[in-house]
Amino acid sequence: MAKMITKEMTLAEVLEISPAALQVLLDEGMSCMGCSVARMETLAEGATTHGIDPDALVARLNEQIQSAATAKGEAS
């Protein structure tokens, strides 16, 4: 089972769990993944800074992870 993302995780942790999350974050307007703040800032902090609902973003990221796991044939 794939590890799920929480809004308390840092942006760096999110990308470590799911490199494909980068596209979701970019689609949402969070283009700061390469900056040093990404190592310290939580997903909730980053989302709020960019005017994004953290809970909706977490849901979208976890849906992306589940879709990828399903495509690989992993059970949930």
Image: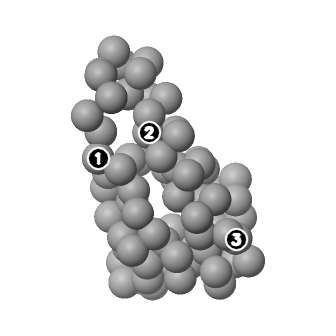
Q: Which residue is mark 2?
A: 65
Q: Earlier in the sequence, mark 3 or mark 1?
A: 1
Q: Is residue 35 above or below residue 7?
A: below
Dot 2 or dot 3, earlier in sequence = 3
Which of the pair 53/40 is nearer the observer? Answer: 53
Tell me the crowding category of disc 1: few under 14, some 14 to 19, or many 20 or more residues within 10 angstroms, Cα based. Answer: few
For label 1, the SS is loop
Q: Residue at x 59, y 69 (%)?
A: 54
From what the image shows, is residue 23 above or below residue 10? above
Q: Return the residue nearer the eye: 39 or 14.
A: 14
Residue 16 x %, y %: 31, 55
- The residue pinned by badge 3 equals 52
Q: Residue at x 30, y 21 (%)?
A: 74
Amino acid bearing label 3: Ile
Check if mark 1's residue and mark 2's residue have beta carbons within 8 Å: yes
Where does the image place residue 1, in percent across and percent down from the top left? Answer: 25, 34
Label 2 Cα neighbours within 10 Å, binned few <14 / some 14-19 / many ≥20: many
> Which image quadrant: the C terminus?
top left
Q: Residues within 10 Å of mark 3 (few under 14, many from 20)?
A: some
